[in-house]
Image (spheres, helix red, strand yellow):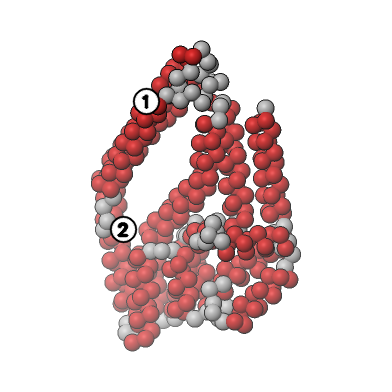
Amino acid sequence: MYWVIGLLLLLTVGVLVAGLVISRQGDSATQQRLGQFVGGLDDDKVDDKAKSQKKASSTSALTQSLDQVLEDRGIGKGLATDLARADLKITIAEFWAVSLMCMIAAAGLAWLIYGGFIFPLIGFIGGFFLPKIYVKSRQKRRLNAFNDQLGDGITLMANGLRAGYSLLQAMEAVGREMPDPMSTEFRRVVQEIGLGVDNERAFNNLLRRVPSSDLDMMITAINVQQEVGGNLSEILEIIGFVIRERVRIKGEIQVLTAQGQLSGYVISFLPIILGLLLYAMNGEYIGRMIFSCESRGIDVEGGALCAQPCGWIMVGVALLGIATGFYAIQKIVDIDV
């Protein structure tokens, strides 16, 4: 009963914090978007202007202080970059509020299914990683989609330059004609340049948001051409052809290795899922391996502290073997082009 009351209290506090953070955003969305565009500048005047606009906005002092503290500490360093790469329009404080709610929800669900305190503790720890896994997966999908579109986008830029467009007009055409996420990123570059950011820093900001080796090659070519001159349209056309061929080869490799990747996921996660399902359906049957309370006349569910050392060693060795096999399969099917 005390565990249930404490869980409900934590859930209530998490919901209140999340509601307070979200409700206080108000009219600061425009200022936050402007801060994304000019946040990487070294110009003191622009920084002072951005700070004064941020203070003048309707965002609460609690939200500003919490975001600043989380961003300056170790738990928030790099998180803003990850959220930008995943194209998630949330602050660091909102992300940690969601993480707290996921931890509480996972612990509560594990307690309702299995009871005791071991599985709720595991669920509480696992819930901490769920939002991070989602951000990483969304970031990976977005990066893959951008790489798939980059060859066509560079070709469109080369055709625009050959037709007489300037570099800025060609990028604007890419932002207008190409689908998301490439259109979004190139529109951001055009907007940054329109706000006074020089081309090199705008491209560096783009590369920081989209860490792509193909994009790095394109940006390097543009920077070199602006310094030494040359036919930029021809250079971009060659780069676009190379990127399209690389995407085609990667697609063929993914088709050939799809069965191995799927086999790795099935072989790795099927024993874990079956074990959890069997324990949920018949805890006494599985509990004989990890709990030794039956020999003392204690109920398995009520005597969770009576651990069976041999069973836990077997579980640990099995998990280690599963993790090792999954890592080996992923390394085998991961072919770099």
- Is label 2 or label 1 in front? 1
Quick one: quadrant of the N terminus?
A: top right
Q: What is the secondary structure assignment of the residue under circle 1?
A: helix
Q: Which residue is mark 2?
A: 247
Q: Residue furthest front?
A: 296
Q: What is the secondary structure assignment of the residue under circle 2?
A: helix
**Left or right of 218, for residue 175:** right
Is 225 or 245 nearer to us in this picture? 225
Residue 106 at what x, y percent from top left?
56, 37
Q: Which residue is mark 1?
A: 310
The residue lying at 42 percent from left, 54 percent from top is 140
Is 114 or 164 nearer to us in this picture? 114
Whether residues under marks 2 and 1 lie with C-beta atoms below 8 angstroms apart, the answer is: no
| Residue 291 visible in rendering | yes
The residue lying at 57 percent from left, 41 percent from top is 103
**Cα distance in 3D space between marks 2 and 1:** 50 Å
The residue lying at 53 percent from left, 21 percent from top is 303
For badge 2, the amino acid type reads: Val
For badge 1, the amino acid type reads: Cys
Is 19 or 216 nearer to us in this picture? 19
Q: Is residue 43 above or below residue 242?
A: below
| Residue 171 visible in rendering | no
Residue 134 at what x, y percent from top left?
49, 48
**Left or right of 46, for residue 210:** left
Quick one: quadrant of the C terminus?
A: bottom left
Which is nearer the N-term, disc 2 or disc 1?
2
Query: How packed is label 2: few (under 14 Cα within 10 Å), some, or many (20 or more)?
Result: some
The residue lying at 31 percent from left, 77 percent from top is 234
